[in-house]
Image (cartoon, rainbow, N blue to C red):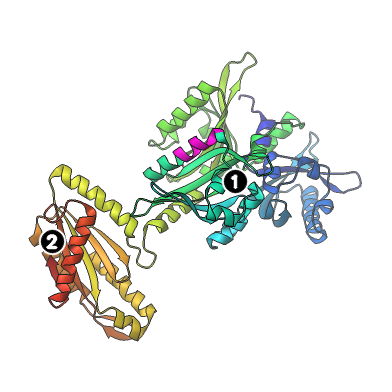
Amino acid sequence: MPTVPYQACFEQSQDVLFLIARRADGAFFYREVNAALLRDTGLSREQIVGKTPRELLPAEQAEHLETVYAGCFASGEPALVESIFDVPSGNRSWHIQLSPLRDETGVVAVLLGAARDITWSRDLAQQLHTVSRQLPGFVFQLQWSEPKGWRFLFVGERVEEMFGVNQDDALADAETLLGRIHPRDRRRVLADSIERGKRLDPWRAEFRMCHRDGRELWVEANDLPQRVDDGTIIWTGYVNDISRRKALETEVRVSETRYRQLVENANDIIFTLTPQGVLSYVSPSWSATLGHPTEAVVGSSVRDYVHPSDLPRCLAFLEQVLKTGKSNGGIEYRVRHQDGTWRWHTSTSALLRSASGEVTAFLGIARDITERRAMEDRIRHLAQHDALTGLANRALFFEHIEHSLRLAARHGEKVALLFIDLDEFKPINDRLGHAAGDEVLQTTARRLVEGLRDSDLVGRLGGDEFIALLHAPAGAEEALWVAGSLCRSLAEPLTVEGQTVAVTASIGVALYPDHASVSAAMVRSADRAMYCAKAAGRNRAALAE
């Protein structure tokens, strides 16, 4: 088995790791901590190493931790504890796993603490301004359009702490904050952000910022873009200070044997990979995370576990590390679990060399980010769908119209647009209340979806206005038949708040290329046809002229 650099793994682990030892007088003290702990707490190594819990924490909290530590030393068994810490980086909630580490005689010498920050999951359901207080960096919402340029819609309160920029000043003039981007990074950051925003790709970047007091900081920015119907792009994301990680120097003084124990108790998966793509070592966390026995994994190809769609990117990532000789991170990919499902991981990788300088393996540190990816998917869904009905919102629907018109032009097909407006909906709201009105809108949405094909799309524009897109109808006669069928379905009585109500709809129908060749003109044509249907007595469909 190749030598694993346990010291480097301890120091560079993304999880918070620390060692607890016991003095001759029985007092517990913190013998060593890694860079992640310093990063997450905002404390320096000198403020922690050599100190007792009573020197760092409130008396009641310190007493509780000392009791847990004493139990681990006495029993030699692992323990779990959750604790909340008030540190310079904020109020942090940690889930801590304590693992006794024994010396050569079998006596417990130190405890390894592996802590995972659960602050985010605790606060996930809170509103945006609440989330912004819990994140180590600051949350923002930024918009850009061709004529108007940049404008912040929301800036978290930590922006002043991080860069010396007042919230109100940043909201009034985006350049107040964007102007803090280092001159050598500014062009790359803004250009890449716009390019990815136009493609609606998630964006992540590391770059330098200049504090008002003259300090230079390294930050990591992550965001998700969305585009509104006028072409404006809005990014929602957050920025973290990663200066400590960038300035990290590996200075570890614990024996190789002990660092091996630290690696094998880490929550991250640590692995080595030969230049040929064969897994030569995996830490026990592989089994805990992915289910495969480690002995079955070692000696097998990485191709057996990485998703086929992600494999080319992973191989290109390793090739880049090999080519530059520099550590690289941030790649996200799927890995096969033993139960057949796919888990999302993110990895960093560096080269391991022999004494002669020859590359012997890649060293990788991987973390499961499946829950984070699911959260991002949920945010993306909420940004593109109507909250009440679950239908496509205006921005998503108009993207589909543009795409459908391009396909129709390419294949010589027709597209039909149905503009749907409920008749006499306001009296229901006034008589039965908004909750009843919401129920009517939800039922309307369900009936529209059920009345169309899976290849068609239904959206809600707002209020009691809906819109539907029919792909490749035979012609106006078929489109009107579908619209008439929807009118009959929507007119079926329904029970709301214990009362039976009937809601009808007027539908305007416009076809591409018969009535318009661009999306905006199609919508106007269908809208005018809808008003013709209302003028003709409602509860019917009318074709654009």
Question: What kind of secondary structure does the magenta stretch mostly adopt?
Answer: helix
Q: Residue furthest top?
A: 356
**Residue located 52% across and 26% down the image:** 321
Is 541 situated above or below 20? below
Is 292 situated above or below 361? below
In this rendered view, identify the residue nearer to me: 397 or 1. Answer: 397
The residue singled out by tag 2 in the image is 479
Q: Amino acid at mark 1?
A: Asn
Mark 1 residue element: strand
Q: Is residue 497 visible?
A: no
Q: Is residue 394 left or right of residue 366?
A: left
The residue range painted magenta reads: 184-191
Query: Which label was assigned to residue 376?
Result: none
Instruction: Say which quadrant the C terminus sits in.
Output: bottom left
Crowding at mark 2 (Cα within 10 Å: few <14, some 14-19, many 20+): many
Please state the horizontal and vertical placement of residue 499, each as a whole percent of the image: 31, 86
Crowding at mark 1 (Cα within 10 Å: few <14, some 14-19, many 20+): some
Q: Amino acid at mark 2?
A: Ala
Please state the horizontal and vertical placement of residue 362, each as a whole percent of the image: 55, 26
Q: Is residue 386 visible?
A: yes
Q: Tell me which label, 2 or 1, sits earlier in the chain.
A: 1
The residue singled out by tag 1 in the image is 240
Please state the horizontal and vertical placement of residue 239, each as a whole percent of the image: 57, 47
